[in-house]
Image (cartoon, rainbow, N blue to C red):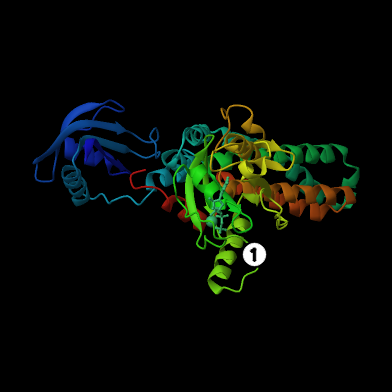
Amino acid sequence: MGGIGIVRVSGPLARELARAVLGSVPAPRQATLAAFHDERARVLDQGLALYFPAPASFTGEDVLELQGHGSPVALDRLVRSLVARGARPARPGEFTERAFLNGRIDLVQAEAVADLIASAHEDAARAAACTLQGAFSQLVRALDARLAGLRAHVEALLDFPDEAPDIAADVPLAAGLAALLSDIAEAVRRGREGRVLQEGVRVAIAGPPNAGKSTLLNALAGHEAAIVSPYPGTTRDLIRERVVIEGLALELTDSAGLRASDDPLEREGIRRAEAAAAQADCVLWTIDDSAPAPPLPPPAARIIVYTKIDLSGRPAGACAEGYAVCAQTGEGLSELRRGLRARLLGRAAESETEGVFGARRRHVAALERAEHALREALAHQTEGAMELAAEELRLAHEALGEITGRFTSEDLLGRIFSEFCIGK
Ligand SMILES: Nc1nc2c(ncn2[C@@H]2O[C@H](COP(=O)(O)OP(=O)(O)OP(=O)(O)O)[C@@H](O)[C@H]2O)c(=O)[nH]1
Ligand SMILES: [Mg+2]
């Protein structure tokens, strides 16, 4: 229920349906006040009608938009009367899917529509809007075009084996490959930043029992999400909290303290804790600064957090190995928050996130594959192995094509568009 409800029709029947519902087809792209009629000429509602003839519409097809009142009952009657006249209800994301299939937008932009709708905070919305405007697509397309040029060059050499060209001596080719490689590496870096903004990141709080993990989670979340007690081994289940820290959406996970244990329940908790740390983008490794026992060795991707500094007397804030905090008083937490953002966002953390485009995991993965294949191609080229270089270039080209949708499987398309809400 709301002020306005919009029913959208796309496809070859849109024009005929406009005439049937409104009595006439509205002038293209002009808001026209009209009564909406059902198939027995009864008035269902009154509102604004907009008609967008193909190809200048969102989907690239004839589109009719009926903006009525936001009554679920009235809207349902309107939809049913359109279906009775030959329309059918759209699948989730079907309008955007058609826009993609009709070449109005590429796949990255289609995904940005969903990301903009789903964005949980301001930076994410800005990044998605930037991608929707085509910033990321243009970058990928420019890389794609350069790669296509280099591929064509190598393929042409392959077509004339009699002349036995020595590609190892082809200086312009080597220079082109090296320059493209460095630009793709830069795109990977920017894509990673974009992904952090768009999808948020997983941060696991890990460490020995009783280190103050749950207290830290509660302090960062701003409420008592996890049980805190003086007994080691309190937390068993994974406790997930969505928090926005310095404009970044994070999923924080608190878990069981890691130690050798005979208790099967605690062992299961530790197994889950280790899995959560392995899947996280970043691990906050807590160490009780007031305890004499030596801490366990921390895993690779981590930020060390010394806890309970009110007892140990260590100064709060950044220190050589990480951050020193007292989660009970909040001392040192703002430095930790800022450090976490810097760690996760890289260079984008310093400047405004203006101009950072949103990206998804699959984009970054494809860019990384392209980078890897190109690196291989360059190595083969240096050794004069032309066929192998050509094959790696083909793989790199395919990886880039997957991003914009030049090269995609039905499967991937189905997965992407099924995430949308209906009507978009
Ligand atoms: N003085 C002081 N005590 C703290 C601080 N942080 C946590 N504690 C205490 O340390 C004890 C353990 O805290 P928890 O947050 O439950 O520790 P944990 O790491 O989640 O422990 P497990 O779930 O058992 O692994 C509790 O008694 C807390 O009140 C701190 O900054 N200062
Ligand atoms: Mg705990």
Nearer-the-camera pick, 74 or 282: 282
Residue placed at 14% from the left, 37% from the top? Answer: 45
Q: Amino acid at mark 1?
A: Arg
Quadrant of the image containing the C terminus: top left
Viewer-proximal residue among 402 and 104 = 402
Name the spot of residue 188 as percent of width and height, x first: 67, 42
Is 161 placed left or right of 84 in the picture? right
Q: In the picture shown, does residue 60 fall above or below 27?
A: below
Closer-to-camera residue (96/337): 337
Res 188 seen here = no
Number of marks in the rendered image:
1
Residue plotted at (74% across, 45% down): 151
Q: Is residue 155 visible?
A: yes
How crowded pointer 1 is (Cα within 10 Å; few <14, some 14-19, many 20+) is rated as some
- Where residue 311 sits in the image (x, y, percent)? 63, 44
Would you say 106 lies left or right of 351 here? left
Whether the residue under disc 1 has CB within 8 Å of ligand 1: no
Question: Viewer-proximal residue, 342 or 207?
Answer: 207
Q: Position of residue 423 (x, y in %)?
A: 33, 44
Split into 4 quadrants, where in the image is the N terminus?
top left
- Image coordinates of residue 246 in percent, x first then y, are 54, 34
Would you name the residue on which mark 1 appears? 259
In this rendering, the answer to whether 267 lies above or below 419 is: below
- Residue at the spot x=41%, y=40% of the render? 117
Residue 259, placed above or below residue 145 = below
Q: Quadrant of residue 357?
A: top right
